[in-house]
Structure formats: structure tokens, C-alpha cells
Image (cartoon, grey):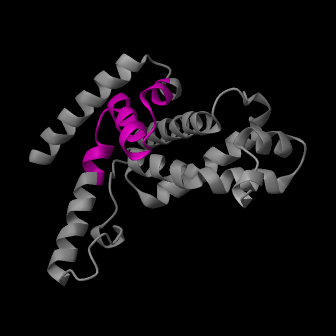
């Protein structure tokens, strides 16, 4: 047996966290924080805001942990909370008239190949920022489906659970999101 055979699953960790084991909730956070961050980053287009949303998501999840249904995947449950936090962020942003979708180019992640020239690396950063801004500008229902299916690689059924819609609706939204994204990126 490997060490992985002895690792508790999410349901067991949630039960332990409810029983007062802080390390169990820490393990849940460690397992799911990157996915929550990616979802928030894709939704809001800003790394700093995504970190805040990720933190808010886990605080809210801890407060609501007693309502977690162990029959459902924790991943789906936490993704729904994250999307709600992203929507809250969008409402606050609208109220404050804050319409920034992407950070300055210098804040973009370095995705260039190690052997790329400085010009190629700069171009890659510009393209990444442009794509992030385009995704962030999509309508919420299309953006959610796109992020869950393509970035988080959730199944159609999981995405439907998170969004509270049918699998066919997820498929339709994904198709429309890709078409709209292609239109935005074409200029």
C-alpha cells in the first residue's frame, strides 16, 4: 500500500474539520486552493483580486461546512462558493465603477519558454494579458461555463451541478463562450 492509500478523502476531511481538527480544513484548502484561485483569476482577470476572492471563498466555506453534503464532491461545492464570491466581487466593482479587467503587463505571469528572446517573452505576456482580459469581459453565464470546463477541466455533469443548470445548457454556454471569445480576440 502506498501513502496515498491512507490519505483521507474530502468527505472525511470535512467531517474531521467539523469535529474541530484545524489540520483537516488546512488539508482541504491545500487540495483545492489552486483550483479556486484559477477559477477566480479567470473570472475577475486580476491576480490580486483573485487571491482575495480565494481567501473569502475558504472563509465562507468554513462557516458553511456544516451544510456540506458529503454525497456531493467537495470540488463542486467549493467551486459554487467561489463563483458566488466572484459574482459578489462583480457587484461591488459595479457599484464602485471599477472596470479594470487585467493587471498591467508587468504583472502578467511569465509563460514564455526559457530560451525565448526578450521580444518573444514580451509578446507572450501581452497575449496572456489580452486573453485574460477577453475572458474576464465575457458575460458571466458564458464565462462560468468556459472556466469550469476548460480551465478546471470539470466534466459536463460537474459543471452543471456547480451552475445549477442542465448539462445541455453547459454545452450551449460553452459553445457560445468560445465563439464570443474568438470574436473578441479577432478584434
Which residue corresponds to the image point at 70% horizontal and 56% vertical from the top-left?
4
Is residue 187 in sight in this rendering? no
Which residue is more in the foreground, 19 or 184? 19
| The magenta stretch spans residue 141 | yes
Q: In the shown orientation, is residue 100 left or right of residue 59?
A: left
- Residue 177 location, x and y as percent? 26, 33
Residue 10: quadrant of the picture = top right
- Residue 33 location, x and y as percent? 59, 53
- Residue 41 location, x and y as percent? 43, 52
Q: How many marks?
A: 0
Which residue corresponds to the image point at 59% horizontal and 36% vertical from the top-left?
81
Which residue is more in the foreground, 73 or 141? 73
Q: Residue furthest right?
A: 19
| The magenta stretch spans residue 74 | no
Q: In the shown orientation, is residue 165 left or right of residue 68?
A: left
Which residue corresponds to the image point at 75% horizontal and 28% vertical from the top-left?
67
Main secondary-structure element of the magenta-colored stretch:
helix
Range of magenta residues: 132-160
Q: In the shown orientation, is residue 164 left or right of residue 8?
A: left
**Residue 127 to residue 101: above or below:** below
Amino acid at each position: 500500500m502506498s501513502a496515498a492509500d491512507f490519505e483521507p478523502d474530502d468527505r472525511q476531511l470535512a467531517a474531521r474539520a467539523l469535529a474541530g481538527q484545524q489540520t483537516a480544513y488546512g488539508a482541504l484548502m491545500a487540495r483545492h486552493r489552486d483550483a479556486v484561485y484559477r477559477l477566480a483569476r479567470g473570472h475577475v482577470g486580476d491576480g490580486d483580486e483573485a487571491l482575495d476572492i480565494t481567501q473569502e471563498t475558504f472563509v465562507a466555506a468554513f462557516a458553511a461546512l456544516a451544510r456540506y453534503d458529503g454525497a456531493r464532491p467537495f470540488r463542486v461545492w467549493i467551486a459554487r462558493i467561489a463563483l458566488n464570491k466572484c459574482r459578489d466581487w462583480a457587484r461591488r466593482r459595479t457599484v464602485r465603477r471599477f472596470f479594470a479587467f487585467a493587471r498591467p503587463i508587468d504583472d502578467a505571469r511569465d509563460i514564455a519558454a526559457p530560451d525565448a528572446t526578450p521580444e518573444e517573452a514580451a509578446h507572450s505576456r501581452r497575449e496572456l494579458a489580452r486573453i485574460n482580459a477577453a475572458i474576464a469581459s465575457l458575460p458571466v453565464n458564458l464565462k462560468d461555463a468556459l472556466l469550469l470546463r476548460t480551465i478546471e477541466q470539470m466534466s459536463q455533469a460537474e459543471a452543471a451541478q456547480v451552475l445549477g443548470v442542465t448539462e445541455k445548457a453547459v454545452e450551449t454556454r460553452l459553445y457560445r463562450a468560445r465563439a464570443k471569445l474568438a470574436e473578441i480576440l479577432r478584434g
